[in-house]
Image (cartoon, rainbow, N blue to C red):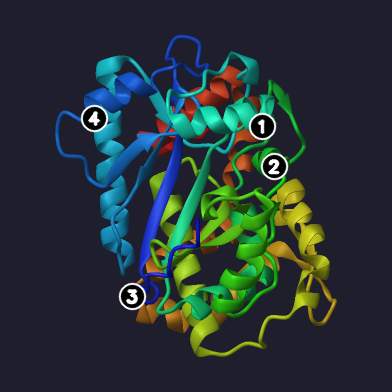
Amino acid sequence: MPLEPFKASASLTLGVELELQLVSPGDFDLCDAANDMLDLLARKPFPGDVKPEMTQSMIEVSTDVFTRYEPLLAQLRAIRDQLIKAGDRLNVGLCGGGTHPFQRWFHQRIFAKPRFHELSALYGYLAKQFTVFGQHVHVGCDNADQALYLLHALNRYLPHFIALSASSPYSQGVDTLFDSARLNSVFAFPLSGRAPFVLHWDEFESGYFAKMEKTGVVKSMKDFYWDIRPKPEYGTIELRVCDTPLTVERAAALACYLQALCRHLLEDHESAPAEDDYLVYNYNRFQACRFGLEGVIVHPRSHESLSLREDILATLRLIDPHAQALECGGALEEIHRVAAYSGNHAWALRRQREVHGSIEGVVDTAVRLFRGEPEALV
């Protein structure tokens, strides 16, 4: 079917999606509680939206469309509070984190939805291994060409979001030595990674997409698992590299960091993106996944090696006027704390493993942090 037209939306509007873990309070493993959660939540109005995900042990929540940080954060907190109430009634814990630390992928059950069963039939065991949890951020675009410009202009900053959101150091019961092991699971899919370098929508639609559709490999934009992809039905670009943070406060801060960065790219007119910018893309992506804020990336233009932590701090100074204009100074303060002092949630989870001496204690901490209990961090 032809690619649907790009539906223009107000520039720099925001929407957030969070994939969340459903956890048994008894053993802290994942539990097949999605149907019960969705049935209970459907009984009264929900702030935002909630829907199933690939397996029965996860759900996805999404916000309304916002222009400012404080209302976005308020709705994320309202969503969290309603989820917690439902979870308490069902004896189910909820938490963020890009991976569950010790679940076994082969125990997971595909959610009974036609598209999920189609994906399971196509991708085999990869579908169950896709029981990983990410934050997606949508940014509104005036037009389709603006969307493609932002998509490619952001490639140089993509490692920031990986490192800042990283919360998946453990997988299948072991420390992976990655701050974000989740993205390795995503990278296993054949249509993941970076988008093709196209800056004009008509060329993308009639050229790249039409050719891909003709091969029979894709039917819609949903078939692409790119790190950033356009969403024509929403009139947005969608950033997909973030692990789900352990708190909704971190999730709101990441979204508004992206918003301020996009405003900078649109108004301050950095150098136009080019194909050669992607020469260092996979290397920088790996550094952010593996080492988090301690990673060292290569600038795509100067080829200078940069400390990821220092690059984030320099970028915060650069975009501060845009943050003030967007009234998201509080979000950037949170990002500054993460980069300069507190570290990402991968670091926090490793610290909890040391303190508790068990990997179950790591999940317990994640559940308590999602409930808004900062004292859970020792």
Q: Which mark is residue 10?
A: 3
Which badge, 1 or 3, comes first in the chain's sequence?
3
Callout 2 secondary element:
loop
Disc 1 versus disc 3: distance between alpha carbons? 36 Å
Task: List the residue tagged with mark 2.
Answer: 189
**Taking 201 as reference, is 91 left or right?**
left
Give x and y (percent) for residue 70: 29, 62
Callout 1 secondary element:
helix
Q: Residue at x 39, y 71 (%)?
A: 329
To which quarter of the image does residue 118 belong?
Answer: top right
Disc 2 versus disc 3: distance between alpha carbons? 32 Å
Q: Nearer the viewer, mark 1 or mark 2?
A: 1
Disc 4 versus disc 1: distance between alpha carbons? 30 Å
Specify the amino acid type for callout 3.
Ala
Give x and y (percent) for residue 300: 78, 75
Task: List the residue tagged with mark 1.
Answer: 123
Task: List the residue tagged with mark 4.
Answer: 41
Disc 4 versus disc 3: distance between alpha carbons? 30 Å
Residue that protrudes farthest toward the left in the picture: 44
Which badge, 1 or 2, comes first in the chain's sequence?
1
Disc 1 versus disc 2: distance between alpha carbons? 8 Å
Q: Are marks 4 and 3 in contact (CB under 8 Å)?
A: no
Q: Residue at x 50, y 26 (%)?
A: 55
Which badge, 2 or 3, comes first in the chain's sequence?
3
Which badge, 4 or 3, comes first in the chain's sequence?
3
Q: Name above or below for residue 272 compared with residue 83.
A: below
Q: Nearer the viewer, mark 1 or mark 3?
A: 1
Specify the amino acid type for callout 2.
Phe
Give x and y (percent) for residue 130: 60, 33
